[in-house]
Amino acid sequence: MLSASQKFFRKYKSVLTVFAALVILDGAIWYLILFSKNSGNLELYFLDVGQGDSQLVNLTGGVQILIDGGQPNSEVLSELAKVLPANDSYIDLIVMTHPQLDHFGGLIDVLKKYEVGVFLSTGRKGEIDAYSELIKVLKARDVPYIIGEAGDVIRHEDASFSVLSPKPQNLLSKELNDTSLVMLLESRGLKALYTGDIGFSVEKQLVKERDLQAQILKVPHHGSRFSSSEEFLNEVKPQIAVIGVGKNSYGHPTSVALDRLQNSGSQVFTTEKNGTIKLVLQGEKVLILAEKPDAGVLLTE
């Protein structure tokens, strides 16, 4: 017997990813569409913050969740200023997937500018001075710090964020990437998997222990060759894969990771080529909007 999620995939496979608005419009019009105020639908933003990760989730009911903040510069503030209303100075939840600078550096400025309801991370301490600054700002702003681990679930109305990793043994790893929070968002039949910087070892663990199927994948570790294994992608079966990446000396996204993603049937977007990417769940369809729609990626119905 098919599960509810399997039925959803089967029923809406043909329309889920093809309802795309990657059209070339007048710049001002395009800007208004991409950065329009919350319509009441579920909205997923993959923010263009250069070589780093930052995603914003707007849940129905106006709840805003920021996952990571990129490098310690003004890029995340600039992107949030485009996405959030000018008079909106509150973010309900900030998630730091793991304490590496290209994921938490920008959060320091976010915490200084915005009121924040709760800060969620793993409890694993960072190894650089900027992490101490982050903790200092959290305390100064009196933002509650809560620790998340595998098995935890955050719920709001019809949406849930399930923490799939890390387990306590993952937090003991010398590799900070493998301590990343991995979270599965589920809302109205849509699933989006947020993966931090996990590598093959955590992917293998998740494949054994979890139902990973999700239509949308935040690609692990900026498209590193040590992430997005064939086995992992076969389980997730992403229809849309988004890579947070900018100019870098690591070769991200690597050709081997891109090949694996394309072979899995995913439509791949990168913030470097497509700018900020916005996905909107509208009834039974996902609307895909890219800041740079003429960057060589076109979808057809």
Image: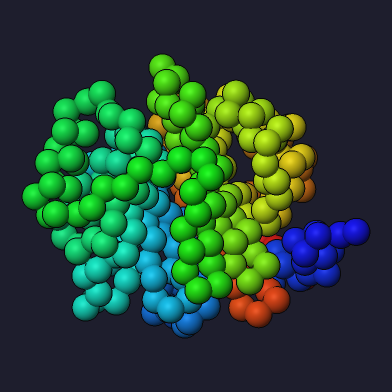
Q: Quadrant of the N terminus?
A: bottom right
Can residue 273 be seen in this snapshot? Answer: no
Q: Residue furthest right?
A: 1
Q: Quadrant of the C terminus?
A: bottom right
Q: Residue furthest top?
A: 174
Color theme of the render: rainbow
Q: Residue at x 16, y 33 (%)?
A: 132
Occupied quadrant, residue 64: bottom left
Q: Position of residue 261 (x, y in %)?
A: 69, 40
Question: Residue at coordinates 24% horizontally, 61% vertically from top-left?
Answer: 116
Left or right placement of residue 272 versus residue 217 in this view: left
State whether residue 115 is above or below residue 171: below
Residue at the image position 29 percent from the left and 64 percent from the top: 91
| The one of 140 and 79 positioned closer to us in this rendering | 140
Q: Left of 90 or right of it: where is 279?
A: right
Q: Nearer the viewer, residue 112 or 163?
A: 163
In the rendered image, residue 40, in percent from the top left (x then y), is placed at 48, 81
* Residue 112 shown left or right of residue 79 in the figure: left
Which residue is drawn at the image coordinates 39% and 71% (left, top)?
63
Q: Position of residue 288 (x, y in %)?
A: 59, 67
Depth check: give the residue in front, 75 or 229: 229
Label count reads 0
Residue 199 visible in the picture: yes
x%, y% of residue 4?
77, 64
